[in-house]
Image (cartoon, rainbow, N blue to C red):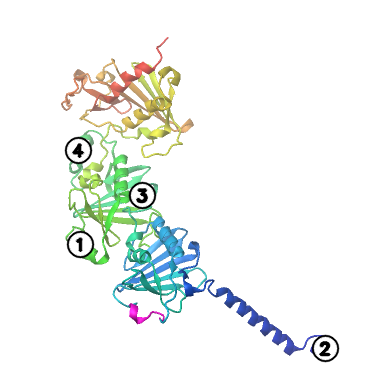
């Protein structure tokens, strides 16, 4: 019989080939259709969103006439848009996805239709959620009224042909969106090393701060140095090492530590409460957010973690004045937040607080080696390893002289000798600005301290030498400002920079530190 299906050349007729192709196509279609059929018989209940978390590309939530859209941008980065546009917390999104993929619906309710009108799926408290799946059909779920006895909620969708019940906890989770996903720090994901410019608005005044060669500089206000405080005024009148000039004007050196603190405060400070869009609109003026009492704009290449934001290189946060003893309002992407005002100390201060005020113009913690001599005798040598990254850089320093075994200190105490010295050097306050002098005898020889710091290695090494000691008042120039008499009974102490002749009065801390180090140094032979 096989011969009946062969043509005279021994091959299959064209009609048979066409029929075979059609049969294969139909079989393939049936196979695919079966593969797409739900893996569960939902008659007795089952999963609402039977997909893996990694397959979920986005969510669309509709509640009380407003829509909120959550989209996966890449990896674990998500973007929130719609009635609320804001930064989201990736860990909160992962938790939500886990809740959704683990959610289960109850048995189908006999005698009900899809979105049965009895359960108010279009009522004021209804919630609709659509889950978008990679390479697959979206899964939609509608929640209506609560069952007055079981306290669960009526639901429809999710591949079912009738209504069913879902736990009240799921309804609560969806009802908390999108607030439960919005970032709980003021500006999430800020990478400080990418920030190149900071625009500050205080009332109706704008101030500009820029990073140049690793240091921060502020464009001089029109009023001059006096606007930044008497300490800045006095220093600028005597020395010029903390200012530079370009086509925009005169720039004043800014404190790196203060800028780091301000950036931390406006980015990583905790959000205590997030107001709804309706509440936000009503609070803008009453809470001093329109116009804002303070506004900070951070600018840097690819700084913004949300690529769907207005600018990938800019993040903006604004603040209103404190409304209570421990809280103040903030404005982020149109959302009114409540944050701690006790943690925003830089914003509370006049803008002059940003100016560099400590004795060293350079940063001691950036050095590679340090040596401390007292009355010509080496007491301490330290080296920076560069392996420890901390806010201060303290842990990157190791003590290499004297030998640890001669000090009787633990390892942490031994290395702390260098660590504490370097941190303290960057924190020395200026008590008085004194006239420049080339007279080394302006500091007494007794208990005189010399500190030598090296930056870089090889041919690129740069050395800074500074000396500390009791000021010999008779050697001061006649134009010198009056010295501030210390309350500890010690004589006034100064720091002198031999290379430039700068002279400043400072507290006695460094002299006292050197005095204490004598006990750890081996006696000279």
Above/below status of 108 relative to 306: below
- Label number found at residue 1: 2
Q: How far apart are marks 3 and 2 (CA)?
A: 85 Å
Please, is residue 279 above or below residue 12 in the view?
Answer: above
Which residue is found at the position 38% from the left and 65% from the top?
170
Q: Where is the N terminus found, in terms of image quarters?
A: bottom right
Q: Mark 4 points at which residue?
A: 233
Q: In front: 105, or 151?
A: 151
Residue that mark 3 sits on: 196
Hey, which quadrant is residue 497 in on the image?
top left
Callout in the foreground (3, 2): 2
Q: Where is residue 215 in the image (x, y as percent from the top left)?
A: 34, 42
The alpha-carbon separation of the residues under discs 3 and 4 comes to 26 Å
For mark 2, does the 10 Å Cα neighbourhood hold few (<14), some (14 to 19), or many (20 or more) residues? few
Q: Which label sits in the foreground, 4 or 2?
A: 2
Image coordinates for residue 174, horizontal then vertical, percent: 36, 66
Q: Is residue 335 magenta?
A: no
Q: How crowded is mark 4: few (under 14 residues within 10 Å), some or many (20 or more)?
A: some
Residue bearing mark 1: 283
Residue toward you, 338 or 224: 338
Residue 114 belongs to the span the image colors magenta? yes
Q: Is mark 4 on a helix, strand or loop?
A: helix
**Disc 3 or 1, which lies upstream in sequence?**
3
Q: Which region of the structure is painted magenta?
A: 112-119
């Amino acid at each position: 019989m096989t011969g009946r299906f062969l043509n005279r050349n021994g091959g299959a007729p064209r009609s048979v080939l066409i029929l075979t192709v059609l049969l294969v196509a139909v079989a393939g279609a049936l196979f695919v259709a079966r593969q797409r059929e739900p893996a569960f018989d939902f008659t007795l209940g089952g999963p609402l969103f039977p997909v893996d978390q990694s397959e979920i590309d986005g969510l669309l939530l509709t509640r009380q006439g407003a829509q909120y859209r959550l989209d996966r941008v890449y990896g674990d980065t998500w973007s929130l848009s719609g009635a609320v546009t804001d930064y989201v917390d990736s860990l909160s999104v992962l938790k939500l996805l886990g809740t959704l993929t683990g959610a289960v619906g109850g048995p189908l309710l006999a005698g009900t239709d899809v979105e049965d009108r009895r359960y108010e799926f279009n009522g004021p408290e209804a919630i609709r959620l659509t889950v978008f799946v990679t390479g697959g059909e979206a899964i939609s779920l509608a929640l209506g009224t609560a069952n007055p006895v079981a306290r669960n909620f009526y639901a429809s969708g999710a591949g079912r042909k009738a209504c069913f019940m879902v736990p009240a906890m799921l309804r609560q989770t969806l009802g908390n969106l999108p607030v439960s996903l919005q970032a709980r720090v003021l500006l999430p994901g800020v990478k400080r090393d990418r920030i190149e410019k900071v625009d500050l608005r205080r009332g109706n005044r704008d101030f500009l701060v820029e990073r140049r060669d690793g240091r921060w500089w502020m464009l001089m206000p029109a009023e001059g140095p006096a606007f930044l405080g008497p300490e800045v005024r006095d220093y600028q009148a005597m020395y010029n090492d903390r200012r530079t000039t370009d086509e925009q004007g005169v720039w004043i050196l800014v404190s790196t530590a203060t800028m780091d603190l301000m950036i931390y405060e406006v980015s990583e400070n905790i959000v205590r409460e997030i107001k709804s869009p309706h509440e936000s609109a009503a609070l803008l003026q009453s809470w001093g957010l329109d116009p804002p009492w303070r506004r900070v704009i951070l600018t840097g290449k690819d700084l913004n973690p949300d690529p769907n934001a207005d600018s990938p290189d800019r993040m903006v946060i604004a603040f209103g004045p404190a409304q209570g003893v421990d809280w103040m309002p903030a404005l982020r992407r149109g959302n009114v937040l409540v944050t701690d005002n006790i943690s925003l100390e830089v914003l509370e201060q006049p803008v002059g607080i940003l100016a560099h005020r400590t004795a060293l113009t350079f940063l001691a913690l950036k050095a590679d080696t340090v040596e401390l001599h007292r009355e010509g005798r080496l007491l301490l040598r330290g080296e920076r390893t560069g392996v420890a990254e901390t806010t201060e850089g303290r842990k990157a320093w190791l003590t290499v002289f004297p030998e640890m075994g001669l000090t009787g200190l633990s390892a942490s105490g031994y290395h702390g000798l260098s660590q504490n010295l370097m941190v303290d050097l960057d924190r020395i306050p200026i008590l008085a600005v004194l006239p420049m002098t080339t007279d080394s005898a302006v500091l007494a020889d007794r208990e005189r301290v010399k500190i030598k710091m090296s930056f870089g290695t090889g041919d690129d090494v740069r050395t800074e030498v500074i000396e500390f000691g009791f000021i010999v008042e008779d050697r001061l120039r006649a134009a010198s400002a009056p010295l501030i008499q210390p309350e500890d009974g010690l004589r006034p102490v100064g720091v002198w920079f031999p290379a430039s002749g700068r002279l400043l009065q400072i507290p006695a801390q460094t002299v006292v530190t050197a005095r204490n180090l004598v006990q750890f140094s081996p006696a000279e032979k």
